[in-house]
Image (cartoon, grey):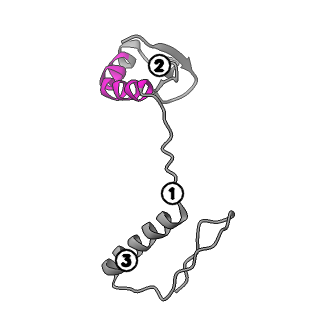
Amino acid sequence: MQYTLIRARKRSLSLQVTSSGELVARAPLFMPKFLIDRFIDGKKSWVAKRLKELSKPVQPKIEHFTEVELQKYIESEIEKYSKIMGLRPTGLRYTHVHTYWGTCAP
């Protein structure tokens, strides 16, 4: 497995897959090369996983809901968790805010 070796005054051995798909190993100055190679061979599955993640196109998951759809979803979740927890909310209020996600009161 091809990699770039960077030696530094540090005590630990680390491995990085860059965004361009290059493998970079950072090792202590006097660590033998065969130990570095053994470490990298032991991380083949991790490297393959990272390279696979890099090859996937990144598409943000953005879903748009109407206010009515969102309110129905929230009410269904409240109903589901009310049964699980054995609690019933006394009221539900929707407001348009931009500075916090929500609040909960006893």
Answer left or right for 61 relative to 96. Answer: left
Q: Write the start and end of the magenta stretch as one range.
A: 37-55
Which residue is depicted at the point 48% across and 32% down? 58
Labels 2 & 1 near each other (Cβ < 8 A): no
* Chain-order first, disc 3 or disc 2: 2
Taking the view exactly as shown, the residue that stands out farthest to the bottom is 90
Q: Which residue is mark 2?
A: 21
Residue nearest the observer in this picture, 65 or 48: 65
**Is 19 one of the magenta-colored residues?**
no
Q: Select label 3 or label 1 by which is in front.
A: 1
- Give the residue drawn at x 49%, y 13%: 4
Give how far across and how far down residue 13 sits, in percent: 46, 27
Q: Position of residue 71 (x, y in %)?
A: 49, 69
Compared across the picture, whether 79 is left or right of 92 comes to left
The residue at which mark 3 appears reads as: 79
> What is the secondary structure assignment of the residue under circle 3?
helix
- Quarter of the figure with residue 93: bottom right
The answer for how far apart the CA atoms under marks 3 and 2 are is 47 Å
Question: How far apart are the two marked residues, 2 and 1, measured between alpha carbons?
Answer: 37 Å
Q: Earlier in the sequence, mark 2 or mark 1?
A: 2
Label 1 is placed on what type of residue? Phe
Callout 3 crowding tier (Cα within 10 Å): few <14, some 14–19, many ≥20: some
Secondary structure found at label 1:
loop
Looking at the image, residue 53 lies above or below residue 89: above
Q: Position of residue 81 (x, y in %)?
A: 36, 75
Amino acid carrying mark 2 in the image = Gly
Front-most of residues 11 and 26: 26
